[in-house]
Image (cartoon, rainbow, N blue to C red):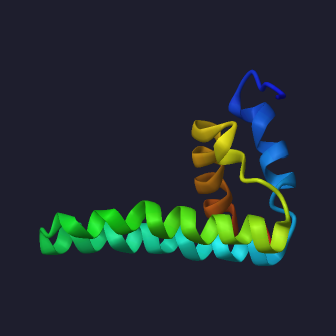
Amino acid sequence: MSTFRNFAEFYPFYLGEHANRTCRRLHFIGSTLVIAALLLALVTGQWRWLWLMPVAGYGFAWVGHYVFEKNRPATFKHPLYSLAGDWVMYGQMLRGRIRF
């Protein structure tokens, strides 16, 4: 298992694991649904909606990896860096720095 000293070293690896556009799109959809579930729970005060966050986030991402990217999600070896990478990639996609 390769090790990374910090997130700056990890992130290029993370982007390389997301070369497939469909995989990135599925990540984006899943992350958007995570935000929607959180907002829904906060607005309604019904915390049961929070269970959708990991299901949507990981569900869409893992389909993207196994079906389209044909690799194993970085979550299994680098869970915290992977979570951070997902949100950095999401922000870069929103700003047009990474193609959908």
Q: Work out whether 100 lies above or below 3.
A: below
Q: Nearer the viewer, residue 82 or 100?
A: 82
Quarter of the figure with the C terminus: bottom right
- Say how many tags the image has: 0
Q: Percent position (x, y) of residue 68?
A: 82, 74
Residue in the image at 84% along x and 44% along y: 13
Q: Note whether residue 63 is visible.
A: yes
Residue in the image at 81% along x and 75% along y: 21
Residue in the image at 76% along x and 43% along y: 11
Quarter of the figure with the N terminus: top right
Q: Answer with the quarter of the image where residue 86 lies.
A: bottom right
Q: Work out whether 41 lies above or below 15.
A: below
Q: Is residue 60 left or right of residue 7?
A: left
Q: Is residue 47 left or right of residue 29?
A: left
Q: Is residue 32 left or right of residue 69?
A: left
Q: Nearer the viewer, residue 55 or 84?
A: 55
Q: Answer with the quarter of the image where residue 27 lies.
A: bottom right
Q: Percent position (x, y) of residue 29?
A: 58, 77
Q: Percent position (x, y) of residue 81?
A: 64, 38
Q: Is residue 31 left or right of residue 41?
A: right
